[in-house]
Image: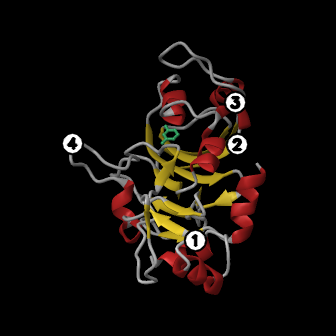
Amino acid sequence: MRINKYLAESGVASRRSSEQFVLAGRVKLNGKTVTALSTEVNVENDTVLLDGKKVKPMTKHIYLMLNKPKGYITTTSDEKGRKTVMDLVTEYQRERLFPVGRLDYETEGLLLLTTDGELANRIAHPRHEIPKTYVARVEGELTRQEVETLSRGVTLDDGTVTKRCKVCLLGVENKLSRIEVVITEGKNRQVRRMFAALNRHVVFLKRMAIGELKVGGLTRGTHRPLKAFEIEYLKKL
Ligand code: URA
């Protein structure tokens, strides 16, 4: 971007005043005084000084909601060449966008992606215990006893015990039970491992919501920017 636009967007002055600063020789780019208004700044790598003081770029963060399909891994790259969630947001490939938390390869549903590292860490941190709502389809007919056991907490394969959570049997169809599970932890593959603790096999798993953010009507594999009130909500969590 042009140097005066960079200065203006960084909030140091208006576009017009920024031009004056450049013309007056008060601006340095990577240690060299620049006076040409056509000077281009690389926001990622360049250092701009005004009167010797560093001008930080005003970062406009990106916040997206993706309805992840199964068959994609939740990383920014994969050495085995598998498809990653970044392949679903290719128009943002020049941005430093990364997924907030994880959904495993076979799991679908709500995944947030952002350039805002601070917010991402806050959402993913277990201390905040943000409820995450999943719908699972599990082989066989889940008993009331099993629902109760899951909600009280079960011992996983690594010996850890899950916290109390909400479990609701939504229905049974074609020998599959549909269950809503709301957990406030984020252990690796937690929902699948909770059912595995009862020798139940999960054949389908989708994250429906993170807190009050719902994947709702978003078509599988598509994404949308978060709305202002949704970003506000996340920031207040
Ligand atoms: N629980 C799982 O088993 N998988 C996920 O991706 C998320 C929660």
Badge number at residue 151? 3
State which tag comes first along the sequence, 4 or 3: 4
Alpha carbons under labels 1 and 3: distance apart: 28 Å
Q: Residues within 10 Å of mark 3 (few under 14, many from 20)?
A: many
Image coordinates for residue 117, horizontal then vertical, percent: 56, 48
Residue furthest right in the image: 236
Image coordinates for residue 49, horizontal then vertical, percent: 54, 61
Residue type for callout 1: Gly
Residue 150 position by quadrant: top right
Residue 155 position by quadrant: top right
Q: Are marks 1 and 2 in contact (CB under 8 Å)?
A: no
The residue shown at (67%, 70%) is: 12
Residue type for callout 4: Lys
Q: Which residue is mark 2?
A: 130
Q: Which of 87/187 is in front?
A: 87
Alpha carbons under labels 1 and 2: distance apart: 22 Å
Q: Which residue is mark 4?
A: 80
Q: Which residue is mark 1?
A: 217
| Numbered disc 3: secondary structure | helix
Image depth: mark 2 or mark 3 in front: 2
| Numbered disc 4: secondary structure | loop
Residue furthest top in the image: 159
Label 2 CB less than 8 angstroms from ligand 1: no
Q: Residues within 10 Å of mark 4 (few under 14, many from 20)?
A: few
Q: Which of 228/110 is in front?
A: 228
| Numbered disc 1: secondary structure | loop
Image depth: mark 1 or mark 2 in front: 2
The reply to whether residue 100 is in sight is yes
Alpha carbons under labels 4 and 1: distance apart: 32 Å
Q: Which of 195/70 is in front?
A: 70
